[in-house]
Image (tube, rainbow, N blue to C red):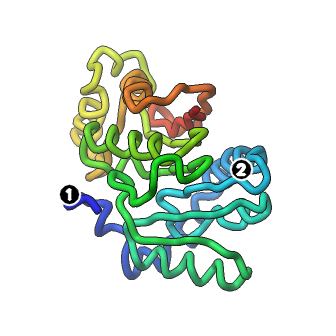
Amino acid sequence: MSSDNYYAKGKYSSEIARRYDTMREAAGERYEAEDELIGGYIANLPEGASVLDAPVGTGRFIPLFKARNCIIHGVDISQDMLTIATDKAAQTNTEVNLRIGDITDLEFDDGEVDYFLSNKFIKWLPSSAHALRALRELRRVSVNGGLVEIRCVDHFVFEIFGHHAGTAYNIIRALTGKSRRNTKIYAKKHARELIHAAGFKITREQILSKHRRKSIYFFLT
């Protein structure tokens, strides 16, 4: 496992882990939109495919993978989140391989899984170098690619900052009292460059919008 230290390694523990599902469900329409988008992706996976959910969190999507008879692997950096996911899987008699791990240094063989899902995590990595390492690991372990969400600022004003667009956006939010610490936001162009540098091809993009800050889901091969 990577020895790098960053905020996400300690974020989802104890009380936050226990309240995670409740907090997500309270997000309402946005949470439902994520379920619809990711549920559609999973529903179109080949039946019986092997999949990696990284980070798996509390096992939110395990029932959807089970419905496709997938061979399920899940990785998370939080043992507390994994404990909840393990309990959920046991309650539904779902066989799943869950392990603690770091998405930037996955303990999987090359091409060990057919597909991957990585939702709402890249933003917690402290730099684009970490993001690239994570994407390269997902490319290495998957045969057919997968679905990754990257938080982007999608506005022409910020594109002029190039790779520093996310930094510029966060500075402006800080000056207006709306900053969210410890997350990294990308210009859409930069996100695409990272994905291509990791060896993926983008087959489709879908945006879940929250004003200028958007969750962009990239469908990759």
- Tell me the quarter of the image containing the N terminus: bottom left
- Where 157 falls versus 22 (above or below)? above
Q: In the rendered image of this protein, does residue 200 appear above or below residue 105?
A: above
Q: Where residue 165 sits in the image (x, y, percent)?
A: 30, 26
**Where does residue 120 sit, x and y in percent of width and height?**
48, 51
Instruction: Give the amino acid type for the residue marked by disc 1 in the picture.
Output: Asp
Left or right of 91 on screen, residue 116: left
Cβ–Cβ under 8 Å for marks 2 and 1: no
Q: Is residue 162 left or right of residue 5?
A: right
Q: Secondary structure at mark 2?
A: helix
Looking at the rendered structure, the kind of residue marked 2 is Ile
Please give the label number shown on residue 173: none
Q: Residue at horizontal 32%, vertical 42%?
A: 133
Q: Quadrant of residue 88?
A: bottom right
Quadrant for the C terminus, please: top right
Residue 168, position as x, y percentages in the image? 25, 30
Q: Quadrant of residue 195?
A: top left
Q: Residue at x 23, y 58 (%)?
A: 6
Q: Is residue 71 left or right of residue 162?
A: right
Quick one: 40 or 172, which is closer to the camera? 40
What secondary structure is marked by label 1? loop
> Residue sitting at 49 percent across and 57 percent down?
54
The residue at which mark 2 appears reads as 42
Residue 216: give x, y in percent of width and height: 53, 35
Task: Between residue 47 and residue 53, name the one nearer to us.
Answer: 47
**Which residue: 30% across, 65% down?**
9
> How far separated are the C-alphas under marks 2 and 1?
31 Å
Q: Which residue is mark 1?
A: 4
Q: Nearer the viewer, residue 50 or 33?
A: 50
